[in-house]
Amino acid sequence: MKKIFILILLTIHLLGNTIEFAKDLFDNKQQYKEAIDIFQKFPDDAEAQYYIGKANFYGMGVEKDLKKAFEYAKKSADKNNSSGLNLLGLIYANGNDEMKAFDYFKKSVDLENTKGMLNLSTYYIRRENFEEAKRWLNNAHDLGDLNATLELAFFLSSTEIKNYKEAIIYYDIYMKSGYKMTSNIYYRMASAYENIGDYEKAYEFYVKSVEFGDKDGILSIIYSEGIRNILSDEEYLDWLKKGVELKLELAYQPLYMYYQEKKDFKNLKLFLEKAYYENKNFEMGCNLSSYYLNLMNLRTEKPDYEKAFKIANQIVENNPKANNLGSCYRTLSYMYEKGDYLSKDLNKAIEIRKKSSDISYEFDKKEDLKHINEKEEELKYRLKLFEKLDIKDEKVFPIINNFTKKEQVIAALETKKYFFFSVNDKSIKMYDKNNLSLLKEFRPWISSGLEGNPLQIVFDENKNILYFSTLNSTNDMSKNDLIHGIDIQSGKIIKTLKNIIAFKNIYLSISDDGKFIVAINNNNLINIINTENNEIQHYNLGDPIILLAANIIKEKDDYVVNVVSTDKKLYKFSINLSRNILIEDFNFQTNFRSFNGTHAEKIFENKNNINIENAKINSKDNLELKINNKFKEFDFKNLIFNEQDKSITSDDKSTSSLSINQKYDGKVIEFVNMKTKNKKEYFLVGDTKLLNSYPIKDKYILLITSDITFMPILNDKGEIIANLQGFSAFPKDIDIKNNKLVYTGLDNIIHIFNLDILSKLKYVKNEFDKEVLEGFSKQFGDDKDTIIENFLNFGEEDLENLRNTYNLSFTPTQDQIKNFFQLFMHKKEIIYPQLSLYIQNENDWIIYTPEGLFTYGGNGKDLLKYHQNQGLYKEAKIIENDRLFEKFYRPDLIKKILAGEKVEIPMDVKSVILNIMPPELKILINKMINAKDIELTYQVCDAGNGIADAKLIINGQSINPPQSRGFSIEQIDNQNDKCKIYKSVHTLYPGKSTIEFKAYDKDMNIANVSDKLEVTADYKIIEKSKNMSIDDIKKLETENNNIVLEKSNLYFLSLAVAEYEDKNYNLKYTVNDVESVKEKFVKNSKNTFENIFTYKLQDNEVTKDNIDKIFDEISKKLKINDTFVLYIAGHGTIQDGKYQFIPYKIDEKISIDNIKQNLAKIANYTNKSLVMLDTCYSGAVIENISDNATTNRLSHDNNSINYIVASSSEQVALEGYNNHGVFTYSVLDAFDKNQTLKVNVLSEHVTELVPKITQEKFHFEQRPQVKLNQNFILSDDK
């Protein structure tokens, strides 16, 4: 029995040793196969079954076999083996049967299986039941399972729990137990210490993790800000280099940033080049591209755009799916945005930036998305620029024909056939290159100040298109993004190109074939524009580069654009490649267009033009002018020029307490009020400079700046209240007296301002000009409130940036910037001239007001025209001033304005032009029916405002035909109520004739004129002599198209009123005067004319009806070579600026229009007519008339009639001279003193004698007015 017991004990001992041996092989020595062989010898042993199941479950020493694993685990679990129960739970968990897994884990832990406890804790962690999870980890740890201790440490330091301090306790227990430490354990310990801020310990354990081979430890040291703070730069740099040496991807970027932070650009460049070229690190290649581009602007070396583009482009093309190339995409996007090497392309820039966003880290992605949004908004804005900026801008502006000197030329162009001049009157003038004659004038959209000035011009000689850029706005810069193409034959704008971000165009050039235009804008912006499709390559070379000129040269299949800068650099751009291809020193490798203005000088060589040196208000409150170094006075009361020997102006020697000082080379101006000691400084941005300043009555001060749109007036506190406008040239002289400001422009136009309004203007703080703010908003993309806030809160950094941007020698102050903003942006009253005066020469001048009123001397009325805008995309309409004559020729009102009187202006010329539609007129058919007679068919249509005073104008002479012989008008069609068609026959004078059809609206506001018709009557007039036979006459008429006429007759008509219905108006000399003149003609002219027919209406016979009848009677008898003389004497007056002749009945005044209509009847048959008007008997009770005005009105549209008109004088009316009026006396004297008397001789005699007599006898100089068109004989006593 004892032996059997010993044998059983030995068997049990041997069995135990064998199972334990196998477990040691499996657990500690990883000799799984040997261990399994032993376990298989004990098929019914629960432990052996567990290990075999585990081996099959994990594939340890055998092929993985989940089925076998389940069988053995089940057997072991059925035997209530805790390890088998745990294994079976794992198998069920692997099969997603978590309920069964939980049951087996639970059974396992009930048997105190610590691995089951770990698995059960995992089960609870997945369900975020961290309390239960921790309980089972603690239980396992309490049972001495060090793996559980470590797992508990991991659990506590996890991101879910973050109980780093407690975790460190368990890490410490585990480490001190002597169990094997790994790099991962050290790493996680270091992380726990880092999270509680113990960076010394963290660094210690990261180092250990690295020593155990964990490369992540290097990255943690590199990326930990706390550890970075405890390391020296040398230590930190060593770790960065170590990470790069091990080619850790995440180590490159920190080393790149380290070199940047330290501004160690030498090592940065070496590192990036090695990282990219040797280590093939594409992310650093992208940074190298950025380095070459110098995006951070931290280096002094110049950007290498070619290398930057080449590297970034190659990387993204060769690695399209790489996810760490954000910097490359951003570099390329930036280059397309900036446009300094590549042609600016916002669409492409946005597309590339989106690729960056797709692969970027979260922070960069946000920045990318923000940037994309900004650029998409900018793109929307830029696309809007390609929409029409306006539909129709119907503003109306007066324009003066005053191109008289080369200084007025803004830009000039010489082509094969033409000279083109862009002139500061906002037109482009085209001259014949051979004879220097003006061929055409082109006028685009314009506005006030400089707005509308054509800046640059180029010509496509193949298509005859003149391209030009204009300064359309000084506020809204987007309106300057236009280049118009005008067909020089038709004068129509046929094409408009967009010239994006133009600001101000300073140079244009065109390729020889006209396909491309290059535009230099705002010093450093380049646009290369395809004229066929308006595609644009845009480049921005940035400050401080200033570009001067450009050209386009075709080279093989490409076009090369050459641009030269002020620093003598030549930039070359390929249109095909859409990029810069070369930058080199400029050594005149290519030629650029230039123009020296010599031809402009030749144009004016023989012109009788004057130069106004200055204009001042003299002691008589008239305008004293210094013209060509001589003094003249313009008499505001009589609207005439007086000669002066010397100046009679007195210099205002009074001093003002207000002054302006300049500082820092004019970049800062200082306002000073010596009375209040108030001072204010303004910083002047850009090129704006102060040219001069003028105090106004010690209350205000006017600043003359280099910006013609900005001539501010400040009050005595230095606050802006007004801006002087209404001129297009800088002043050569300014004079201020009695609240009148006289502005003499360099263009010789004198503007007179009334400054009374200044006393009514108040400064309201922070009340800004909406239009100016709107322009800033469009230009910079910020809303108006942001712009205001930015200016009013200018910080120190902003000031420093401003200093660097403008290369200033000083840093502006915040107050200087705020004051500048208030000066330019504040709301201000715009003050326009009360009236303007332009003197072309000593005879021709014009005064005009903003409302359109005008008066003139000589041919001055033709100097003024009106420019009506049709929008930015269409050429303007030009309205000749002559079309407005009837309503706006008002010398009477202009006198009152000059006298300071309040004047009620009937209607504004701009309102008339924009709102009143004159009739539409056409000459439909013209047919010469013989050598001298023409048959005309013409049409007049009511355009909405009625029809009045329709008339034909032949050779400048209006024709108002009677229904009688030789000339009849027949209405041949009346298609509708609006249009009527007429036919008439007219006898033309020999040679060339011009014919127009003219009519006003029903209220005589504005006329329309048909296109001018030019015809030739090919015949001669021969006066019949006494020895001519009938055969001689027939031969002359049939062979040579001649007309033989009888000797001419004289028709003399006098209208005179001495006795009026109202006896208070009776005059003494009028009837006697006209009878005396008639007798002189009858006596002295009997040998001159075949017959002398006299007609008269006197006293109560002088009525409108009688006058009409007598003119009709005379017109029936007149032949083409007859002479007609009209002499009028009596009272005259003014009504609505027009002369009215007063007949017998005072209330039945006869207007000048009626007189003209009757004269037009005469003018249809003869061009030898003389009108003499003596209204010098107007008397004290009747308002004096302006005889110059009367002459101008009479001669308007009556160019074939001569006028000699007496000037009215109260003294002459009361006294008389030798029983005659002085004017009549001088006419009679001319007959007595001249054996042969012609019209011009009579005119000279009267204009010389009348002033002499009136000065001697009445101490008053009466000046007759004359308007001569034809010279012919009046008498010949030979």
Image: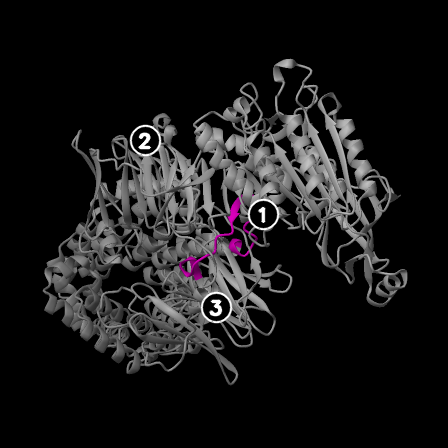
Q: CA distance from mark 1 to mark 2?
A: 68 Å
Q: From this view, report whether residue 314 is shown above or below residue 905.
A: below
Helix, strand or loop at label 2? It is: loop
**Relative to 1222, 178 lies left or right:** left
Helix, strand or loop at label 1? It is: helix
Q: Residue furthest bottom?
A: 556
Residue 413's tag is 3
Residue 77 location in percent, x, y? 38, 61
Three-letter amino acid code of the residue under disc 3: Leu
Q: Nearer the viewer, residue 1010 or 713?
A: 1010
Residue 921 location in percent, x, y? 75, 47
Discs 2, 3 touching: Cβ within 8 Å: no
Q: From this view, report whether residue 1252 is shown above or below residue 309.
A: above
Residue 634 location in percent, x, y? 42, 39
Label 1 belongs to which residue? Answer: 1241
**Relative to 319, 1037 lies left or right:** right
Taking the image as drawn, is residue 113 in sight? yes
Quarter of the figure with residue 435? bottom right
Over which residues does the magenta segment extend?
384-410
Q: Label 1 neighbourhood size at 10 Å, few (<14), some (14-19), many (20+)? A: some
Q: From this view, report whether residue 73 is shown above or below residue 833.
A: below
Label 2 belongs to which residue? Answer: 765
Q: CA distance from mark 1 to mark 3?
A: 48 Å
Discs 1, 2 touching: Cβ within 8 Å: no
Observer-side mark, 2 or 3, equals: 3
408 in magenta:
yes
Residue 979 location in percent, x, y? 81, 42
